[in-house]
Image (cartoon, rainbow, N blue to C red):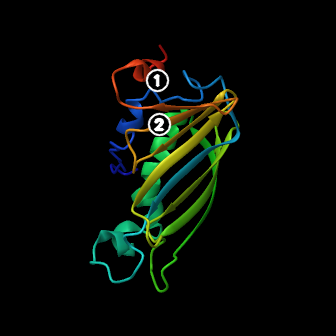
Amino acid sequence: MDGYYDIVASALSSDPLSYGAPGACNGPFGSDRCDPAGSYLEYVQGYLTFDEVPPGWRLDPVRVGASMILIDIGTHAHHLGAYVVGLDLANVCADVGHVVPGRKVDDYGSLLLRYSNGARGSMWVTNAAAGAEHGLSFRIFSETGGLEWNQEEPNRLVHRDRAGFEKIVTRRKDASSTTARGG
């Protein structure tokens, strides 16, 4: 790459890490594979809903490129999803564009994902969703159940087993957290 590297330092995966969610499809909450259509990732924000935002790198196509949304928050949603699922992406089909009229960079993306083991997923990212605050979230499903997490409630991970029974896992240091660690 001619001596240049794109590096994304993402601390966003540190929240689910405390719950034992990494590798959920291969770990304590899952099996050896994710169900088809098993991961749903979202990062939905509203701070760029209107064009009356302060100028900066996010809206400058020269500085950010055409697809600001994938470079800005799309990388975080992808990183969190890959971290929790524990699989690499093999294929992506993306519909990206702008929601705000006249905007010169993409502020919306809807992606279909295919992981290295054939599992499917989707990702929706935008920072032009009126009323949205900071909606990074995931829903991951495997043969044995699913996990749901939302950054707006970072101390709460929902684990549902195959029968649909729900267990709320928190950061508390009691029995709930030992179950989250696979104990």
Q: Is residue 72 above or below residue 17?
A: below
Q: Which quarter of the picture shows residue 55?
A: bottom left
Q: Residues within 10 Å of mark 1 (few under 14, many from 20)?
A: many
Residue displayed at 35% across by 44% down: 10
Residue displayed at 41% across by 69% down: 46
Give the residue at mark 2.
157
- Find the distance from the CA under tag 1 to the CA under tag 2: 9 Å
Residue displayed at 69% across by 29% down: 162
Q: Residues within 10 Å of mark 2 (few under 14, many from 20)?
A: many
What is the secondary structure assignment of the residue under circle 1? Answer: helix
Q: Amino acid at mark 1?
A: Ala
Q: Position of residue 49 (x, y in %)?
A: 42, 76
Disc 1, disc 2: CB below 8 Å? yes
Q: Nearer the viewer, residue 174 or 52?
A: 174
Q: Position of residue 61 (x, y in %)?
A: 39, 74
Residue displayed at 37% across by 29% down: 18
Q: Is residue 34 left or right of residue 175?
A: right
Q: Is residue 16 above or below residue 69?
A: above
Q: Nearer the viewer, residue 139 or 85?
A: 139
Q: Position of residue 104 (x, y in %)?
A: 45, 79
What is the secondary structure assignment of the residue under circle 2? Answer: strand
Q: Which quarter of the picture shows residue 53?
A: bottom left
Q: Amino acid at mark 2?
A: Leu
Q: Is residue 19 above or below residue 80?
A: above
Give the residue at mark 1.
180
Residue 24, disc: none
Q: Position of residue 48 (x, y in %)?
A: 39, 73
Q: Is residue 131 left or right of residue 113?
A: left
Q: Nearer the viewer, residue 3 or 96?
A: 96
- Mark earlier in primary sequence (1, 2): 2
